[in-house]
Image: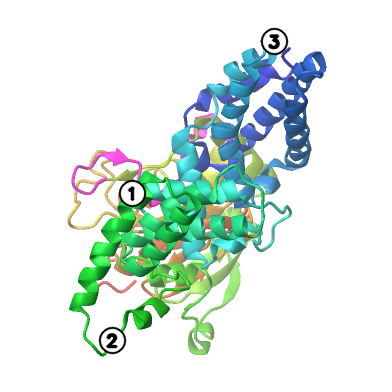
Amino acid sequence: MTSWRTPLLISCIMWHAQAEFFTSIGQMTDLIYAEKDLVQSLKAYIQEEESKLAKIKSWAEKMESLTIKSTSDPEGYLAHPVNAYKLVKRLNTEWLELENLVLEDSTKGFIANLTIQRQFFPNEEDETGAAKALMRLQDTYKLDAEMISKGEFPGTMYRSVLSVDDCFGMGKTAYNEGDYYHTVLWMQQALKQHDDGEEATITKVEILDYLGYAVFQLGDLHRAMELTRRLVSLDPSHERAGSNMQYFEKLLKKEREMTPLNETSDTRELTTQDGIYERPQDYLPEREIYEALCRGEGVKMTPRRKKRLFCRYHDGNKSPHLLIAPFKEEDEWDSPHIVRYYDVLSDEEIEKIKQLAKPKLARATVRDPKTGVLTVASYRVSKSSWLEEDDDPVIAKVNHRMEQITGLTGTTAELLQVANYGMGGQYEPHFDFSRKDEPDAFKRLGTGNRVATFLNYMSDVEAGGATVFPDFGAAIWPQKGTAVFWYNLFRSGEGDYRTRHAACPVLVGCKWVSNKWFHERGNEFLRPCGTTEVD
């Protein structure tokens, strides 16, 4: 039996099937309703088969309780990253397991409904992406696995926890990615919860199997041996563990032969008993500075600099409209000069822009500096769309407003880009302008380089999601209805490399932004060139 919502639901989500749900919280809200619809369909099936399906009925009641809470406020519910991860995990893994159970029965109504809808569900890539998003939050905001497992996030309206099986799933995802550092963190948490008596379908043997090998890959031979011994004590017939034991013993014997007499193995073992390992270095040189700024640490706002920052009314260089109703302008940074404007977008305009953008959202891309080809990248996790003035009068109105505020022409500017950040959504440090090693980046536009960036914040973010500038230590926090503006190029036309910036991962909340990139052509007399690089 299919519920009355099914045709509407399918039409709503069909356009973004297999579309990387985890990269956009805005689109993930559709999954909330999809899951609710499945619960209703499942309940109807249970009424017909109640005497035979007590186990399935228990599952359905648990899911119904969850969906009642989630559908009352989908974005608020998904603002908690554990809820978002578990939603993706349920729809990719656990509902499939339920399908296999129901298939043992002859009744086909529920299966037909589930089979139709499941083709629009998140896939393995989504579950992997959601797990990696939680790990990104774990690293950036220095959250330990236990804190995440208990759902202890700042400013959340909902509380959600990870089970032993969930933690094991996180660790297994990391393992499959060759990420042994996070494998250890999450397998340790799974083992801790298991040891504390929490019920689980995963056994300690399975956890220890992954944990022991991952610890070995991190170079901790002594602890790998200890964990493998524990595994063998639980399952003496475990073939792989037995082979590993023999291999580890050979390595330990070789290590003891090479160890100086004044250094004992006991001393070395003490340094790794707590299972704490150093996070490996990666490709981003300013990783530590960038993540510290995301946490609000290391911001270089000195008292002397603060004295140079002012707020004022801005009339857009005597724009007739703004002379009557000027915008409130506040300095965010002195050099390079970054300003924030208040009440740039109304709530009604924001909702209209989101409404127009949502059906067009697609995974945000970056330009490969070597090939010039647009491609997706792990360091930019969001979905974006481009809106034209013909899409709705509000777009033309907002574009005109940005021209008035900046005093620049929008004739050669790029379309309004709207972005919605997903689980742990981020855009790591990057430049908006093209550098000398990529001179053809905007060649097809024929409008020169990106002279300035105008960034609208279309939502508040409960935690995380700041715009940070690692070069000079600034952090700008989202505030709904406001916008920030800066020039990417000096008056000489040279790029201002200090403007390398990043969108920090969203820890809690749903982040929507829109931006306009103004280009050089057409602005020669509105922002005249200079002979020096002084702004």
Indicate the position of residue 427 as horizontal and vertical percent values.
Answer: 42, 54
Residue 392 relative to residue 53: left or right: left
Which disc, if any, is residue 107?
3
Mark 3 or mark 1: name the one nearer the start of the chain.
3
Identify the secondary structure beneath mark 3. Answer: loop
Where 150 falls versus 85 (above or below)? Answer: below
Image quadrant where residue 104 sits: top right
Between disc 3 and disc 1, the foreground one is 3
Q: Which residues are magenta?
A: 368-393
Quarter of the image with the C terminus is bottom left
Identify the residue at image location x=78%, y=38%: 65
Which disc, if any, is residue 33?
none
Where 127 falls versus 144 (above or below)? Answer: above
Around disc 1, counting alpha carbons within 10 Å, would you say few (fewer than 14), some (14 to 19), or many (20 or more)? some
Mark 3 or mark 2: name the one nearer the start of the chain.
3
Of the residues shown, which amino acid type is indicated by label 2?
Answer: Glu
Where 435 falls versus 258 (above or below)? Answer: above
Residue at numbered disc 2: 263
Around disc 2, counting alpha carbons within 10 Å, would you say few (fewer than 14), some (14 to 19), or many (20 or more)? few
Image quadrant where residue 273 sits: bottom left
Residue 466 relative to residue 247: left or right: right
Which disc, if any, is residue 522?
1
